[in-house]
Image: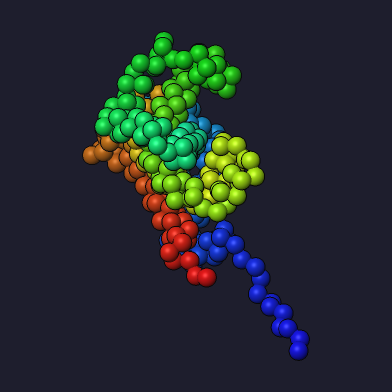
């Protein structure tokens, strides 16, 4: 009697999660908007420059006539108080806002994943000490830590490695770019705490599994088990939390811009543009609406995608 050959294609966690994600309409909408935003902020400033001649720092040549102009064919989003094209500034500001969110999240992932995995796997006294350090940082409002870091290391006290980065990327004496790199450092330095707890909890449930015991039996080192076996198996929750950390970091940057501690001119972020626009909300509302709506749409999309990924990677909802 011949055996029936199964024609069903083999599946995997990631393929199954991808199928589940595509069934979530809000998550797909969020993903499409994010792809559009990333493409727009990368190539948009060049297109605007080629089509209109305006860049994010182009000052008007006709005096006060171009200042605070309403949306028009020449300026689709209007102009700001200095007469600069808002569309060009929103696209340029999107680069910085997304960079702040993504790079600061990557910094927090690097620190939080390593810290939480080491604490969870080693356990005992080392785990207690490491997590009490996290609790101490948790007891301090993290926005105050960021403000202190920006106040202490900003200006003449900016670390040399940040000055080196800004000099090699933006030119000598580029204080505005130094402030951006300092934001990456400060926000990433305080946003890893929850990530460390998430990864520690995952590692605590995995470290007594058979594949870890097998790795121990074959002589794999402690750090080899942590970084080659345990951390890859925590990627699901890590990816979900990362997509939810990016909007949180972007909102923090926007709040810092309202306080004057964010991105400095001539550069701009969505937060700093909104801070400038709110001053003239009653007279020139488009100066707030343009960056505000763009930022809100991006943050909603990131949250939709994060929720979709959480549902797609949740083992309780996966069908076997």
The quadrant holding residue 269 is: top left
Q: Is residue 215 left or right of residue 185?
A: right
Q: Nearer the viewer, residue 251 or 92?
A: 251
The answer to whether one can see residue 101 in this image is no
Counting every numbered tag in the picture gives: 0
Above or below — where is 172 with respect to 25? above
Question: 226 left or right of 66?
Answer: right
* Residue 42 x/y as whole percent: 56, 40
Q: Which residue is the extreme one toward the top?
A: 156
Residue at coordinates 56% horizontally, 48% vertically from top-left?
A: 212
Most extreme residue toward the front is: 217
Q: Position of residue 135 (x, y in %)?
A: 31, 34
Q: Residue drawn at (56%, 37%), measured in percent from left and top? A: 222
Work out whether residue 74 or residue 302 is closer to the camera in this orientation and state it: 302
The residue at the far right in this view is: 2
Say which quadrant the N terminus sits in: bottom right
- Can you see residue 31? yes
Q: Which residue is depicted at the point 47% across and 40% down?
A: 121
Q: Nearer the viewer, residue 129 or 148?
A: 129
Image point 65% across, 45% down: which residue? 218
**Farthest residue in the bottom direction?**
1
Across and down, in percent, residue 312 comes to 47, 61
Question: Does 50 sit above or below residue 297?
Answer: above
Q: Measured along the vertical axis of the image, is residue 268 above or below residue 213? A: above
Q: Name the image colouring.
A: rainbow
State the image coordinates of residue 26 (x, y, percent, origin top left).
Answer: 43, 61
């Amino acid at each position: 009697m011949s055996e029936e050959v199964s024609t069903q294609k083999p599946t995997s966690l990631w393929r199954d999660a991808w199928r589940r994600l595509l069934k979530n309409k809000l998550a797909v909408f969020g993903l499409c908007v994010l792809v559009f935003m990333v493409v727009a902020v990368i190539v948009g400033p060049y297109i605007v420059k080629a089509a209109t001649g305006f860049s994010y720092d182009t000052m008007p040549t006709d005096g006060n006539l171009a200042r605070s102009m309403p949306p028009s064919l020449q300026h689709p989003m209007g102009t700001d108080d200095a007469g600069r094209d808002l569309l060009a500034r929103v696209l340029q500001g999107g680069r910085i806002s997304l960079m702040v969110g993504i790079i600061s999240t990557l910094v927090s992932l690097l620190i939080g994943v390593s810290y939480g995995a080491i604490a969870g796997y080693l356990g005992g006294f080392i785990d207690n000490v490491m997590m009490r350090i996290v609790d101490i940082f948790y007891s301090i409002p993290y926005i105050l830590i960021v403000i202190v870091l920006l106040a202490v290391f900003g200006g003449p006290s900016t670390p040399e490695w940040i000055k080196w980065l800004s000099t090699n990327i933006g030119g000598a004496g580029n204080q505005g770019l130094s402030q951006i790199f300092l934001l990456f450092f400060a926000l990433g330095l305080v946003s890893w705490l929850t990530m460390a707890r998430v990864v520690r909890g995952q590692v605590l449930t995995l470290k007594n599994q058979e594949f870890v015991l097998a790795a121990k039996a074959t002589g794999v080192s402690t750090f080899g088990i942590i970084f080659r076996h345990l951390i890859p198996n925590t990627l699901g929750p890590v990816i979900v939390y990362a997509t939810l950390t990016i909007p949180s970091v972007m909102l923090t940057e926007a709040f810092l811009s309202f306080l004057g501690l964010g991105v400095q001119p001539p550069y701009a972020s969505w937060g700093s543009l909104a801070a400038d626009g709110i001053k003239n909300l009653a007279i020139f509302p488009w100066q707030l609406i343009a960056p505000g709506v763009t930022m809100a749409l991006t943050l909603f999309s990131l949250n939709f995608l994060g929720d979709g990924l959480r549902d797609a990677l949740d083992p309780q909802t996966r069908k076997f």
